[in-house]
Amino acid sequence: MKSRWLQRSAGIVASGLTLAALAFSSITPINAAPFDGARQQFTDERFATVWNRTDSVDVRSERSWYWGPGPWFDYAEFYRHGEQGLRTVQYFDKARMELNHPEDRSGWQQGVTNGLLVKELVSGRMQLGDNPYDVDERSPADVPVAGNPRSANPNAPGYGAFAGVTTVDNGYRDPNRIGQRINTTIDRGGNLGLRDDLATEATEIVQYNTVTGHNIPRVFWDFMNLQGRVYEDGRVRTGVVVDWLFAMGYPVSDAYWTRSQIGGVEKDVLVQLFERRVLTYVPDNPEGYKVEMGNVGQHYFQWRYPHLGQPWATSNPNPPLVYATEAFGTSHWEVAMYATTGSVRLTNSDAESVGYSYRRSFQPDQTRILIDSRRSDGEHRQIYEFAAGALYGGGEGVSLRRITYSDGATPPIGGPYPGWLPNGAANEYNAAYSPDGTKILFISDRMGNPEVFIMTASGNSPAQLTSNGCVNESPGWSPDGRSVYWASNCGGDFELYRAEITYQYDTSYGVAAQLSNVRQLTDNASDDRFGRVSPDGEHIAFTSNREGNDDIYVINSADGGGERRLTINNANDDAPTWSADGQILAFASDRDGDFEIYTMNLDGNEQTQLTNNNVADRWPMWAQ
């Protein structure tokens, strides 16, 4: 099993003195993954080194956080100049750490950077590579720069409100105002005002940055040059707490007074935007906390992943088990949720609905299920996104968004664009959300054979990944999004495959990628199908008929080794799926005469029947 180190427990992270005993050079960085149960541990030793310098318990006493209590989300995000077009990132309350070039171990940061998140939030231009003009155009963020989230902070300015007074590739500069005190306010609409009562000695401008053309008040300049305890080279010493150019970048605005809700009280807050961070000053805060780094990591995450909620404020999401069933008096499949009191119907149509993957979210009402159905023309399978409100008390009257239009139906104005259909109407199915919910793998026969495709979560402009002329099915992702898995029948039986995925671009408008280092994981004369990757990315559970009937097996995801057979009987056991914590497998079995849903431990023991009726229940699915 892979391991992470420096695990946060109850908000307390291992001390700097404890870390001194660790041999950093012996620790191999591991892949990032948002839902593998270890998101609050550092995904790379270098991230821990940077965090530990300022925020470990041995050095931080009586001062505010520079990064935050610990990490809470990590992933492999698109970056054009990274390995495979990806870079490992990890989010903290105050910022995001990045490894753009993992081979770079220069400086005390060992190649760790933290992005120009504030510039992106203000401009709406998400950086895609080293070229500053290589961006994905989005709307500027309306996330409040200070205080509570927008729902509890209606009047505070968001990042977009600063667009007119911020340097974001627009040549904007403020004049030198050294010696003046700050009395300028800004509201949510970006309107400026004056309040002379706020122009205190602490706000006197003492520095003017000539690079970007912005003034820095005394209270922020003192914080940027604060002396204190830091952890470096295996010991605690006293020095400048933060390398402000590394941590914050250059100022991109002057400082402005805002009105922001903090807790349940609206307060005057002085804020200044830097390329990477925001500084806030609340005069009536306790000493050591009057000036703080703003929660830019949280703010950027809300802007980039609005569908994922707030992982810093909640535990890992654990949506319930769903499956396909004929239990509702229909002649076709419908999607149901398992409950101890009986099946809860989720879909209701005159054609079949079969779920294939979840999009997990730290905000329960943002949970989504991808299903395929012939409900459009009664013939061609198409992909739909089911807003799973019924899982959380929303009932059956929930929204269903159509994603693919390869059957000839006309897409709505604005898309999604179905892409090239050389043979006319096609089938699209087996749709699998990426772990971060931004992309979808699926199977399409638009080119003749069923091949693996990829598209954005909007369904726009799918791109083909496989072109082997075989029958491909059941694609899935590694938890970090760097690899994909699928089953392929090229010579008379299905085998399992793995490949790395390399991106040329990945934007809100489309995605282009290709597979590399393709590896066959199983090789025998039987069918190995329906593979599902474990939450930690280490194993694949799958179905094989090598003993004359379907049974459940597990192999190592890296090389196909370590094979274990989990079910041994004369019935058919198939379509395994992993629980969110990776400790239980659910599967379908016809051992009582028709297919029902069962669970078992990872050693094959404690096999327990969940459903019990006289119709078929198939294809169970926990969120992956």
Image: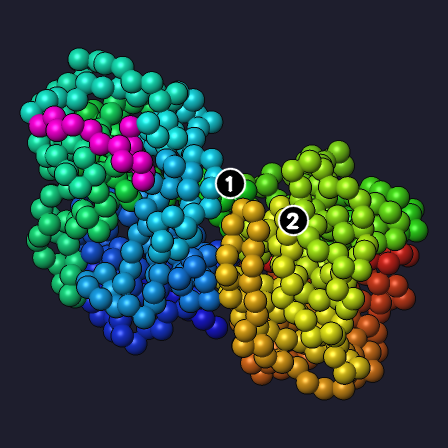
| Crowdedness near tag 1: few (<14), some (14–19) or many (≥20) residues, C-alpha within 10 Å | few
* Quadrant in which residue 102 is drawn: bottom left
Looking at the image, residue 16 lies above or below residue 438? below
Looking at the image, residue 88 lies above or below residue 126? below
Q: Residue at x 43, y 30 (%)?
A: 142
Left or right, residue 556 beside residue 88: right
Q: What element does badge 2 sit on?
A: loop
Q: Amino acid at mark 2?
A: Gly
| Crowdedness near tag 2: few (<14), some (14–19) or many (≥20) residues, C-alpha within 10 Å | many
Residue 506 position within the rendered picture, expressed as x and y whole percent measured from the top left: 51, 54
Q: Residue at x 81, y 54 (%)?
A: 425
- Circle number at residue 599: none
Residue 194 position within the rendered picture, expressed as x and y whole percent measured from the top left: 23, 14
Q: How is the image coloured?
A: rainbow
Tell me how far mark 1 sits from mark 2, CA to CA.
17 Å
Query: Which residue corresponds to mark 2?
Result: 459
- In front here: 138 or 62? 138
Q: Residue at x 9, y 57 (%)?
A: 237
Residue 485 visible in image: yes
Left or right, residue 590 beside residue 447: right
Which segment did they paint magenta?
Answer: 165-178
Q: Residue at x 26, y 32 (%)?
A: 172
- In front here: 511 or 392? 511
Looking at the image, residue 41 lies above or below residue 250? below
Question: From the image, which quarter does the C terminus lie in?
Answer: bottom right
Query: Which residue corresponds to mark 1?
Result: 306
